[in-house]
Image (spheres, grey):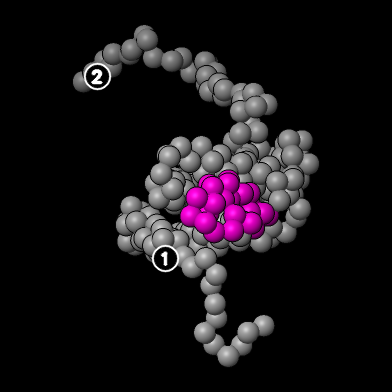
């Protein structure tokens, strides 16, 4: 006994060609941004030397010439990534300094750096590495120096009001910002204690150190020069 099998007239006929999936073509700006994000991730994880143009291109799904077309090579891509991160960190710190009271300004500066580390971890990992190529925005050390300059004016006014020599404000600004930056490098991996607690301890040391500052500090050891 033969059973008739009904056929679905809506089925795709055997002679129909498979439909092509359309790919959305990126604009030049979109491709550049994609390569920057991929490069940022790879440089953070592997460093400059450990990252290759081949890997960047493969992650982006493009050929090597596309990377060269946008950045001239790995060095150009790395330079743009570093410059962007340095500007971002400097902007975050300088824009955070809005309070009137010096102690709260210290808190704001500490939080700004810790916020950057928390939100842009890959960027901070790249910045604290020694850059193998010159940067238009300088090195991480020069960035810290730029931030210290912002703090320097605040300290200068505070020193003057307390009868201290305002000419020493740059030295103390470098010391305070350097303390926060180095603590940030340590906190980058341990992430303990919590951010607010780290900021509180940093400000505790900085503020009470400044509060008990001697107008003319002296050495107590044998060495005097």
> Considering the numbered disc 1 on the image, is that residue within a helix, a strand or a loop?
loop
Q: Is residue 194 above or below residue 32?
A: below
Residue drawn where x is 50% and y is 63% of the image: 179
Find residue 17 and report its horizontal and vertical position in percent. 55, 18
Q: Pointer 2: residues within 10 angstroms few (<14), some, or many (20+)?
A: few
Q: Residue 63 at x, y = what percent?
A: 70, 40
Label 2 sits on a secondary structure element that is: loop
Task: Give x and y (percent) for residue 87.
Answer: 61, 41
Does the segment drawn in magenta span residue 94? Answer: no
**CB under 8 Å between discs 1 and 2:** no
Q: Residues within 10 Å of mark 1 (few under 14, many from 20)?
A: few
* Residue shown at the point (61%, 34%) measured from the top left: 33
Which stretch is magenta? 139-167
Residue 142 in the figure: left or right of residue 112: right
Res. 41 in view: no
Which of labels 1 and 2 is toward the front?
A: 1
Residue 49 got which mark?
A: none
Q: Quadrant of residue 61?
A: top right
Instruction: Kindly identify which residue carries mark 1.
Output: 212
In this figure, which residue is indicated by the disc labeled 2? 2
Nearest to the observer: residue 38 or residue 159: 159
Residue at (66, 38) in percent of width and height: 62
Tell me if 40 is positioned left or right of 1 in this view.
right
- Who is closer to the viewer here, 35 or 137? 137
Picture coordinates of residue 210 (x, y %)?
45, 61
Which quadrant does the N terminus fall into?
Answer: top left
Can residue 102 be seen here? The reply is yes
**Closer to the camera in the image, 104 or 56:** 104
**For the residues marked 1 and 2, what is the alpha-carbon distance in whole angstroms?**
103 Å
Q: Is residue 142 within the magenta segment?
A: yes
């Amino acid at each position: 006994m033969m059973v008739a099998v009904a056929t679905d007239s809506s089925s795709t006929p055997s002679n129909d060609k498979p439909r092509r999936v359309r790919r959305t073509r990126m604009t030049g700006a979109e491709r550049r941004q994609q390569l920057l994000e991929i490069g940022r991730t790879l440089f953070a994880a592997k460093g400059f030397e450990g990252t290759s143009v081949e890997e960047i291109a493969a992650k982006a799904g493009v050929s090597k010439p596309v990377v060269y077309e946008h950045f001239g090579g790995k060095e150009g891509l790395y330079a743009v990534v570093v410059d962007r991160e340095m500007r971002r960190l400097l902007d975050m710190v300088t824009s955070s300094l809005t309070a009137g009271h010096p102690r709260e300004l210290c808190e704001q500066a500490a939080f700004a750096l810790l916020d950057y580390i928390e939100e842009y971890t890959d960027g901070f990992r790249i910045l604290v590495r020694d850059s193998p190529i010159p940067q238009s925005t300088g090195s991480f050390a020069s960035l810290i120096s730029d931030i210290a300059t912002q703090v320097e004016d605040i300290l200068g006014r505070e020193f003057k009001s307390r009868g201290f020599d305002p000419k020493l404000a740059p030295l103390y600004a470098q010391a305070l910002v350097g303390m926060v930056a180095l603590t940030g490098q340590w906190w980058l991996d341990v992430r303990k204690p919590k951010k607010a607690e780290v900021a509180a301890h940093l400000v505790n040391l900085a503020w009470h150190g400044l509060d008990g500052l001697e107008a003319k500090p002296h050495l107590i050891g044998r060495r005097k020069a």
